[in-house]
Image (cartoon, rainbow, N blue to C red):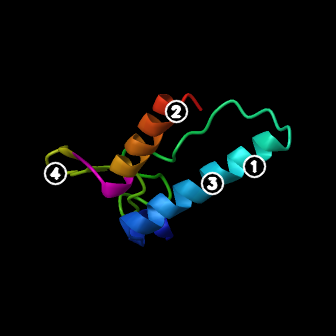
C-alpha cells in the first residue's frame, strides 16, 4: 500500500512538498528538470492491484463516477497558484 491509499491528506501533501523541494534542489545543482507530474490526478483501477488503491488527487466514486477533490488536491492547486503568482 502506501500513503496514496492509506495516508492522510497531510501525509500526501507532505510527500508532494518533499518531492517538489527535491526537484528544486536538483535544479539548483544544474539538473535540467522540465516538469513534475503528480501520480495520479484521478483514482483509478490498476491491473495488478484492482480498485483498492486510491492515489489520485481527485477521488472517484466508482458507483456513480462522481469526482471529489481531496485535501491533497486542493493543496496542490494552491501550491501551483502561488508558483504562478510569484513567477517561479
**Residue at label 2?**
86
Of residue 30 and residue 66, the one placed in the foreground of this image is: 30
Image coordinates of residue 50 in percent, x first then y, are: 40, 58
Foreground: disc 2 or disc 4:
2
Of the residues under marks 2 and 4, which one precedes in the sequence?
4
Relative image position of residue 70 (x, y in whole percent): 30, 54
Q: Are marks 4 and 3 in contact (CB under 8 Å)?
A: no
Give the labeled residue for mark 4.
63
Rounded to the nearest angstrom, the CA distance separating label 3 from label 2 is 20 Å
Label located before the other in sequence (1 or 2): 1
Q: Is residue 44 visible in this depiction of the protein? A: no
The reply to whether the C-beta atoms of the residues labelled 2 and 4 are less than 8 Å apart is no
Q: Is residue 60 visible?
A: yes
Q: Secondary structure at mark 3?
A: helix
> Which SS class for mark 1?
helix
Q: Earlier in the sequence, mark 3 or mark 2?
A: 3
Circle 1 or circle 2, nearest the eye? 2
Q: Quadrant of the C terminus?
A: top right
Pointer 3 residue: 19
Q: Which badge, 4 or 1, is on the more N-terminal residue?
A: 1
Magenta span of residues = 68-72
Q: Evaluate if marks 4 and 1 touch, with contact meaning CB atoms under 8 Å apart.
A: no
- Inter-mark Cα distance, 2 to 4: 40 Å
What residue did someone put label 1 on? Answer: 25
> In front here: 57 or 45?
57
Q: How many marks?
A: 4
Expressed as whole percent of the image width and height from the top left, the position of residue 82 reads 45, 38
Question: Disc 1 and disc 2: Cα gap in Å?
Answer: 18 Å
Classify residue 72 as left or right of residue 64: right
Amino acid at each position: 500500500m502506501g500513503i496514496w491509499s492509506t495516508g492522510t491528506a497531510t501525509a500526501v501533501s507532505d510527500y508532494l512538498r518533499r518531492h517538489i523541494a527535491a526537484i528544486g534542489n536538483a535544479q539548483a545543482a544544474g539538473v535540467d528538470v522540465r516538469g513534475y507530474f503528480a501520480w495520479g490526478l484521478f483514482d483509478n483501477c490498476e491491473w495488478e492491484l484492482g480498485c483498492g488503491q486510491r492515489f489520485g488527487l481527485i477521488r472517484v466514486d466508482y458507483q456513480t463516477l462522481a469526482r471529489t477533490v481531496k485535501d491533497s488536491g486542493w493543496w496542490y492547486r494552491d501550491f501551483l497558484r502561488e508558483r504562478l503568482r510569484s513567477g517561479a
